[in-house]
Each structure stands twice: as structure tokens, then as C-alpha cells.
Image (spheres, rainbow, N blue to C red):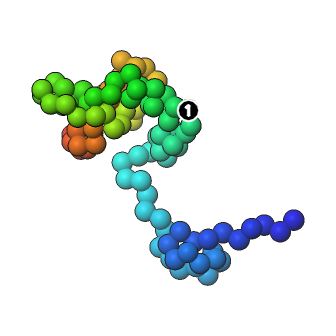
């Protein structure tokens, strides 16, 4: 059986041993296993259910604002020992609040 040819993500040409395109940028701040977790169907379904139950950003609500939840955030990051599936370690946030919290976690 002939293997299908792979396409380079950078130049969109057929990959070969002589491809000199730079490697794809890594997902900064994520360990590989966390990246795989967040892109798994199990996590996506779980996060979708949590967002349905908590449709507003928790931090915005605490500040008296109303913004829709766009992401599920681990209160204590997994890399710091936080539980992955414990709903008590999860909160629904808007993108702005998530970016601020994630920057402060580092």
C-alpha cells in the first residue's frame, strides 16, 4: 500500500526529507499532555456542559459585569497539581479574564 504524501504546514508543499521550513511553533506554556487533554473530545464535551451550566464569566460577575463564558479554566493549574476533572477546581471565564488570570499564574 502506498502511503499518502504529507503536506508541510508552513509552505503547503509536499513534505520531503529536504524540506527546510521552520518547525511549527510550540504551544507556549502548555506541557504536551495538557495540550492533548484540551483538544480531546472528552474535555471538549465536558467543557461544553460546564459552559452550558455556567453561561457567564465568573470574574466579571464578581465585578458586577455581565459577559458570556467562553472558556473553562482550572483555578489551580494542572501543572501546579490542580485536579483536571474536579468541578470545584474549574471556573467559566471570558477570554479577557482567562488571559489575565493565565498571565498571573505564570
* Image-based side of 42 in relation to 66, left or right: right
Q: Residues within 10 Å of mark 1 (few under 14, many from 20)?
A: few
Residue for badge 1: 42
Q: Secondary structure at mark 1?
A: helix
Residue 14: quarter of image: bottom right
* Image-based side of 25 in relation to 42, left or right: left
**Residue at position x 57%, y 71% in the image:** 8
Q: Give the quadrant of the N terminus.
A: bottom right
Residue 13 at x, y = what percent? 59, 78
**Residue at position x 41%, y 53% in the image:** 27
Residue 47 at x, y = what percent? 44, 31
Q: Give the quadrant of the C terminus.
A: top left
**Closer to us: 58 or 75:** 58
Residue 52: quarter of image: top left
Residue 64 visible:
yes
* Image-based side of 59 in relation to 39, left or right: left
Name of the residue lying farthest toward the top: 88
**Residue at position x 23%, y 43% in the image:** 96
**Residue at position x 50%, y 36% in the image:** 44
**Closer to us: 17 or 75:** 75
Residue 81 at x, y = what percent? 39, 28
Name of the residue lying farthest toward the left: 64
Residue 28 at x, y = what percent? 37, 53
Amino acid at each position: 500500500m502506498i502511503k499518502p504524501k504529507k503536506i508541510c504546514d508552513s509552505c503547503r508543499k509536499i513534505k520531503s526529507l529536504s524540506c527546510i521550513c521552520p518547525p511549527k511553533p510550540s504551544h507556549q506554556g502548555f506541557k504536551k499532555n495538557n495540550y492533548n487533554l484540551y483538544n480531546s473530545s472528552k474535555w471538549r464535551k465536558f467543557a461544553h456542559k460546564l459552559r452550558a451550566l455556567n453561561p457567564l464569566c465568573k470574574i466579571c460577575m464578581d465585578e458586577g459585569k455581565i459577559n458570556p463564558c467562553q472558556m473553562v479554566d482550572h483555578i489551580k493549574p494542572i501543572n501546579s497539581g490542580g485536579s483536571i476533572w474536579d468541578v470545584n477546581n474549574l471556573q467559566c471565564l471570558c477570554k479577557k479574564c482567562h488571559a489575565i488570570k493565565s498571565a498571573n499564574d505564570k
